């Protein structure tokens, strides 16, 4: 398995020798299954699981897609509860039922003042546009494709200082808003934006009210990434792209105070921390 940062957790359901001995003594009664989980068991974390092909997996009672190789994804939101229930029905009828401990995090509070009033408190016309934009974004986040691009790991989509972190509570012109659901990379207008990993371009929108020029990529199994406020879009909907493909340039379209890339990663409707998928940020000297 590749792609997630060091510190990844691997759990073997049964050690090799234990499995070997049991398998010899009790043929047919004990499965030689193993379960590996790679990625941080923390709020905002994405975990890539691997079990046997043909197994059925559910997390907190919701079933998740399992690839023909036995790969599956689970993710934990900003405010995920301290335990999550992972259940696996193995092809031989055995059942794994595991309670996962999810690490809690503390989040920052961030104040942003000086935003145009029209964009902080939108009128009916703006609200209609926002609703329409959100419906398009939500439709992409419902995709559950068979692709497994997530297995090849992630890279930073842009270079520059981090100007906004995942999970922070934003206070815009004094009004508390929803927590920040991605990472902001500050860089001059025109700087390149790359696909964090491969996938299919599921949305390339030239003008969303809040997010401006917006691209979304479907990486498979419900995992999508979004690239927001861009100056130029260099890809089209339906296009298959590789990790590192240039998809646009940094801009300040939509609701922003200056040029930056907002990068978000979601597993279906659950926002994850993109920073946990990559190493330390790449900042130009
Ligand atoms: Zn942002």
Image (tube, rainbow, N blue to C red):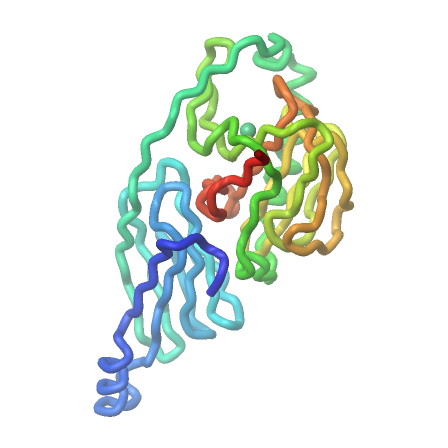
User: Residue 95, located in which quarter of the rendered image?
Assistant: bottom left
Confirm whether residue 279 shows in the render.
Answer: yes
Q: x, y (%) of residue 138?
A: 59, 39
Q: x, y (%) of residue 211?
A: 64, 28
Residue closer to the observer: 40 or 96: 40
Q: Is residue 117 above or below residue 67?
A: above
Q: Is residue 51 above or below residue 9?
A: below
Residue closer to the observer: 52 or 103: 103
User: Residue 129, located in which quarter of the rendered image?
Assistant: top right
Residue closer to the observer: 233 or 217: 233
**Quick check: 142 left or right of 109?**
right
Q: Is residue 136 above or below residue 38?
A: above
Q: How many marks?
A: 0
Q: Which residue is located at x 49 percent, y 62 percent?
A: 2
Q: Is residue 65 above or below residue 30?
A: above
Ligand 1 quarter of the rendering: top right
**Quick check: 269 left or right of 138?**
left
Q: x, y (%) of residue 187?
A: 63, 29
User: Residue 12, located in which quarter of the rendered image?
Assistant: bottom left
The quarter of the picture where the C terminus appears is top right
Q: Which residue is located at x 36 percent, y 41 percent?
A: 43
Q: Which residue is located at x 73 percent, y 31 percent?
A: 190
Q: Which residue is located at x 27 percent, y 87 percent?
A: 23
Confirm whether residue 272 shows in the render.
Answer: no
């Amino acid at each position: 398995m590749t792609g997630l940062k060091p510190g990844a957790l691997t759990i073997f359901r049964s050690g090799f020798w234990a499995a070997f001995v049991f398998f010899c003594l009790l043929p047919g009664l004990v499965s030689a299954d193993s379960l590996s989980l790679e990625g941080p068991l923390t709020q905002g974390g994405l975990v890539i699981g691997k079990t046997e092909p043909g197994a059925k997996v559910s997390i907190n009672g919701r079933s998740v897609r399992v690839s023909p190789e036995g790969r599956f994804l689970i993710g934990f939101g900003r405010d995920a509860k301290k335990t999550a229930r992972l259940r696996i029905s193995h092809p031989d009828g055995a059942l794994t039922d595991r309670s996962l401990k999810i690490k809690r995090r503390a989040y920052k509070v961030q104040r942003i003042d000086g935003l145009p009033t029209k964009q902080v408190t939108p009128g009916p016309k703006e609200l209609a546009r926002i609703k329409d934009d959100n419906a398009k974004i939500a439709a992409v986040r419902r995709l559950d494709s068979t692709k497994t691009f997530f297995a090849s790991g992630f890279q930073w989509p842009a270079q520059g200082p981090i100007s906004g972190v995942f999970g922070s509570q934003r206070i815009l012109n004094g009004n508390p808003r929803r927590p920040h659901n991605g990472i902001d990379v500050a860089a001059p207008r025109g700087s390149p934006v790359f696909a964090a990993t491969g996938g299919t371009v599921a949305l390339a929108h030239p003008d969303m009210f809040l997010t401006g020029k917006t691209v979304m990529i479907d990486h498979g199994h419900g995992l999508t990434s979004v690239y927001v406020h861009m100056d130029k879009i260099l890809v089209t909907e339906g296009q298959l792209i590789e990790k590192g493909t240039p998809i646009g340039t940094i801009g300040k379209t939509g609701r922003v105070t200056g040029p930056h890339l907002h990068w978000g990663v979601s597993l279906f409707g659950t926002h994850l921390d993109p920073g946990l998928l990559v190493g330390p940020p790449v900042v130009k000297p």
